[in-house]
């Protein structure tokens, strides 16, 4: 990997560390899936990433504003699907969109 690419990667990681110094890589994967396809369902992210639904629920709780233990990050919002209330759709919050903009500038 070139020095320039490593610098970009380091800048991305720095942005995430500013949110939480121990921001788990699984949360980064989930956030990236939501950023690339807003409205994606919990199940679809679970299928794509291989993260179990129980872990996915805790992850979304942390990325949104519904974390049970610890500080929620407010990066995503969760909405019930219009056609099936059991299905949860995920979108970037204003804070999440700002983070994506910052990360895109790094790339």
Image (spheres, helix red, strand yellow):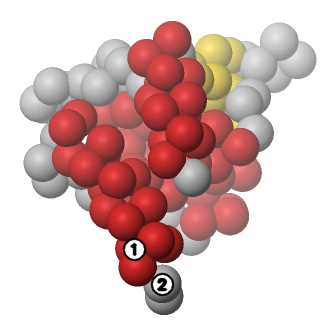
Q: Position of residue 9 (x, y in %)?
A: 41, 64
In this orientation, which residue lies closer to the viewer: 107 or 52?
107
Label of residue 6 in the image = 1
Element type at marker 1? helix
Vertical comparison of 21 with 26: above or below:
above
Q: Is residue 12 above or below residue 59?
A: below
Residue at the location (68% across, 64% down)?
48
Using the rendered view, name the quadrant where residue 82 is placed: top right
List the residue tagged with mark 2: 2
Q: Nearer the viewer, residue 41 or 30?
A: 30
Give the vertical position of 62 relative to 82 (above or below): below
The percent coordinates of residue 42 (x first, y second) are 62, 42
Q: How many residues crowd around disc 2 within 10 Å: few (fewer than 14), some, or many (20 or more)?
A: few
Asked whether the residues under the numbered discs 1 and 2 touch, taking CB atoms below 8 Å apart as contact, a structural biologist would say yes
Name above or below for residue 32 compared with residue 25.
Answer: above
Which percent across, then down, holds residue 44? 72, 51
Q: Can residue 24 be seen in the rendering of this structure?
A: yes
């Amino acid at each position: 990997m070139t020095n320039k690419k490593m610098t970009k990667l380091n800048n991305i990681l720095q942005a995430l560390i500013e949110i939480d110094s121990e921001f788990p890589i699984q949360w980064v994967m989930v956030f990236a899936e939501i950023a690339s396809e807003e409205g994606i369902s919990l199940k679809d992210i679970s299928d794509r990433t291989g993260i179990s639904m129980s872990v996915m629920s805790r992850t979304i709780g942390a990325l949104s504003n519904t974390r049970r233990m610890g500080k929620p990050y407010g990066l995503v919002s969760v909405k019930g699907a219009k056609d099936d209330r059991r299905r949860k759709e995920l979108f970037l919050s204003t804070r999440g969109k700002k983070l994506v903009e910052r990360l895109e500038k790094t790339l």
